Image: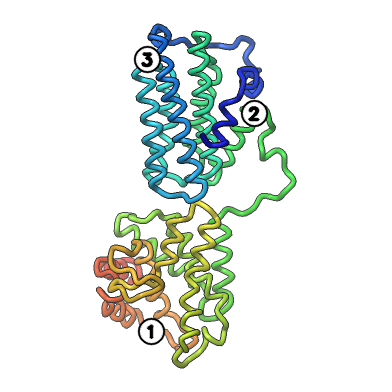
Amino acid sequence: MSGFVLARAVYTQKDTAYRHHSVVQRHSLMSHFECPDFSDLDKGLIEDFRATVNDSQEEIDACIQRLNQTGREDDVHRLFRALHSLKGNCRMVSLDPMVELLHDLEEIACDLRQGHYAYGQGLGNFMLEVIDISRELVGQLVEQGRADEDIRQYLIKAIRRIREAPDPDRDGLCRDVLAELHGEPPQQKRGALPELPGDITLMKELASQLDSLSIYRKGRSEQVLDLCRNLNDALGQPVDPTQLAAAVYLHDLGMAFVPAGIVQKQGVLEREEVYQVQMHVHVGARLLQRFGDWDEAAAMVMQHHERFDGSGYPNRLKGEQIHTGARLIAIADSFCAMTNERHDRTYKKTLFTAVREVNAESGAQFDPDVVEVFNDVIRQHYLTR
């Protein structure tokens, strides 16, 4: 049993009542719910059920701890299955009020699986708290024949508010709910520090600073993003638009750390110089990983110089091994570079020349399917400008 679960398991009923005081204190009379069919079950069966609840809590705790560390998608699937199993066990023993609560919590895991919003540690901690309180409610039913309805209703309403919250506010709302459950003031009211910009806002500012370093990059990030969005929309949005925007903003951030003499060099680069240029993909990718919740964008940044034929860098990925978003960025970045002046070429290629060169790399540098969509997008969105 993890230390986190063990610490929760030793709470006494007195501790629990005190911890939840702030939620129930506005009720003059505490309301309860009963599950008579559950209470009438054989005691041995009830104890077996409680053991499965404890096992489920440990499994959910482990999933969330791993999500906090790595954010792996397979742990989201494991979390969903663990919640679904716990809900099913509650239904089997006629704990219908608990089924309702756990179903709403399961919907959060379902949202995460379907990519409706990103996982955050505040959300994970909230889910752990709901599972912990659910276990306590089961304990009340076993020992007293009834359990706290006020807490159950509060959690259901909190879950629904959290699901409906705007993405930037979700983790903060989770922390506020946890603070109220623990009888603490909401975190945003403790204030002292100014509000920091959101991740995307900060990424956009970094991209703007990078573009300002060279007269040849003015507005480049927004140009690339505009084309990427059009390509993604034309393909039916296989890539999450927010993750794609993050990747575009930071895909070339590492170039700010490549010496100007290398960036502006007109001749052939030496081996060490090539290495320094190729390492730029690691900078944006690692920064996105450190932000948290941006692993998909990090993969796009790391892979946007891979080539469809497998001859790119840094990992010589080939074809479908390359993230779809990285394949979009590869075309958009190359096209925008061709249609703007550069250090090594102080003239812009015409749109038709750039389109021809992109098509010449179909199946080599670029995904042929994306090239076809690129041609349609250019006709629809760029020839009429």
Q: Mark 3: few, some, or many residues within 10 Å (few <14, many ≥20)? A: some
**Residue found 51% across the figure and 77% down from its top:** 217
Q: Position of residue 133 (x, y in %)?
A: 53, 25
Mark 2: secondary structure: loop
Q: Nearer the viewer, residue 45 or 19?
A: 45
Q: Calculate the distance from the C-alpha at mark 2 to the C-alpha at mark 3.
A: 30 Å
Q: Calculate the distance from the C-alpha at mark 3 to the C-alpha at mark 1.
A: 71 Å
Q: Judge whether residue 346 can be spotted in this image.
A: no
Mark 1: secondary structure: loop
**Residue found 66% across the figure and 21% down from its top:** 18
Q: Mark 2: few, some, or many residues within 10 Å (few <14, many ≥20)? A: some
Establish if 366 lies above or below 8.
below
Q: How is the image coloured?
A: rainbow
Q: Of the two numbered discs 3 and 1 on the same chain, state the one appearing first in sequence.
A: 3
Q: Position of residue 339 (x, y in %)?
A: 40, 79
Number of numbered discs visible in the structure rendering: 3
Q: Is residue 17 rendered to the left or right of residue 94?
A: right
Q: Of the two numbered discs 2 and 3 on the same chain, state the one appearing first in sequence.
A: 3
Mark 3: secondary structure: loop
Task: Tell me the kind of residue under disc 2.
Answer: His
Q: Quadrant of residue 125?
A: top right
Q: Position of residue 194 (x, y in %)?
A: 70, 50
Task: Tell me the kind of residue under disc 1.
Answer: Lys
Q: Which residue lies under the disc numbered 3?
A: 94
Q: Which mark is residue 182?
A: 2
Q: Which mark is residue 349?
A: 1
Task: Tell me the kind of residue under disc 3.
Answer: Ser
Q: Quadrant of residue 300?
A: bottom left
Q: Quadrant of the C terminus?
A: bottom left
